[in-house]
Image (cartoon, grey):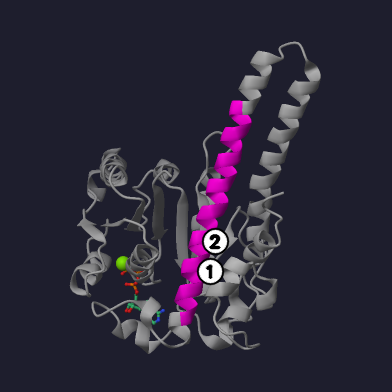
Amino acid sequence: MSTFKILVTSQKGGVGKSTVSANLAAYMRRQGQSVTLIDFDTHGSSSTWMTRAPNIGVVVQHHVLPLDQGGNRPILDARLHLRRAASSTEVVICDLTWTDSIAGELMFEYDLVIVPTSVSEIELTATAGFLSRHRWVFDSAIHTPPTLLVCPTRVQVEQLNSDVFSKQRFPVSFMLAPPVLEAQSAREMFERGYLMDLQDACGASFNEFGKSVCAAREMRESAQGMRQTINTRGTASSMRTAGAPNRATAGSNFLANSSTLSSQYSILGRHRMQKVRPEELSPKAAVQAPAPQNTSIASMSIPQFLKRMSMGVMSK
Ligand SMILES: Nc1ncnc2c1ncn2[C@@H]1O[C@H](COP(=O)(O)OP(=O)(O)OP(=O)(O)O)[C@@H](O)[C@H]1O
Ligand SMILES: [Mg+2]
């Protein structure tokens, strides 16, 4: 399996990028993955968090990008650090505050771009603007676009049912992660431990978010695996059966199915959060889901794409 590269970014400050980065690194490590966290921010919040909290075995790096030098320097530096880290770990997570001096091409280096945002009007507008400006990346037909996962962070319980992630507002292909709840306990975990170990609603919400990242990874990797199979089969069949249009047609149908698949999960991502009964989840997801209760985070926050995936839509 190739290294899974995750960028946690947004142009807005204070939305929870470093909290998400450090805690996702810990979460993925506990899933048995070798993980490198690269903190590209001047403050070094996520790297400090990881180095001072109990050692969980994540490799931590802090590299400040030369943003003031303009040109290609920031992206060249970022690429270099990312590729080096990717050569020795299964998961790389980068924490980066986006600025206009960073070339958008950098995002193509990643498999997954996580954009944390609170659900306040002011932040949603800023997030929508950021995503619209980078629509050419996420909807690229030329390069393989990274999967975009919008993560509502610092969400108050009373905001859980708000319907703010419409496709009119976010005119770009994206998946919606379960929200990470706002809690004093999350602030107190800084440098002390990890959100996944919190025994409260915030801890449960973070674990749901971690699961959704793993699900997004599985979906991407199975789509990629399918494409590879198609390419291999397509080449093989055209070599074997040159001049046999029926075989070639079969190959292109397969290809058409694969592009349906990728656009399908883009579309699925546009579904807003909605209630999913735990029994509708796949056995695998159900094993990890917290106790079924109508008001639990588990029943409120699993996005539609997980539900569809568990129903086998993605594997058709
Ligand atoms: N789920 C949460 N509940 C409560 N507070 C949170 C939560 N997530 C983050 N915070 C707090 O919000 C503040 C900003 O978080 P964080 O540093 O992770 O954001 P950031 O986007 O990395 O900020 P910056 O732009 O400064 O790098 C911190 O004080 C942090 O403790
Ligand atoms: Mg930060």
Mark 1 crowd level (few <14, some 14–19, many ≥20, 10 Å Cα): some
Q: Is residue 110 visible?
A: yes
**Is 278 inside the magenta-drawn segment?**
no
Residue type, numbered disc 1:
Leu
Which residue is rendered at x = 56% and y = 73% of the image?
287
Q: Which residues are magenta?
A: 204-232
Q: Residue furthest left?
A: 52
Mark 2 crowd level (few <14, some 14–19, many ≥20, 10 Å Cα): some
Up/down of 92 relative to 291, above or below: above
Q: Secondary structure at mark 2?
A: helix
Q: In screen coordinates, is 171 left or right of 146?
A: right
Q: In screen coordinates, is 219 left or right of 81?
A: right
The x and y percentages for residue 213 are 49, 62
Residue type, numbered disc 2:
Ala
Q: In screen coordinates, is 54 left or right of 10?
A: left
Q: Of the numbered discs in the image, which one, if any, rests on residue 204?
A: none
**Is 229 inside the magenta-drawn segment?**
yes
Residue 33 occupies quadrant: bottom left
Instruction: Tell me, yes or no, whether the two marked residues, 1 and 2, touch with CB atoms within 8 Å.
Output: yes
Q: Nearer the viewer, residue 60 or 156?
A: 60
Up/down of 251 relative to 164, above or below: above
Count how many numbered circles sit on residues in the image: 2
List the residue tagged with mark 1.
124
Q: Of the numbered discs in the image, which one, if any, rests on residue 128?
A: 2
Residue 162 occupies quadrant: bottom right
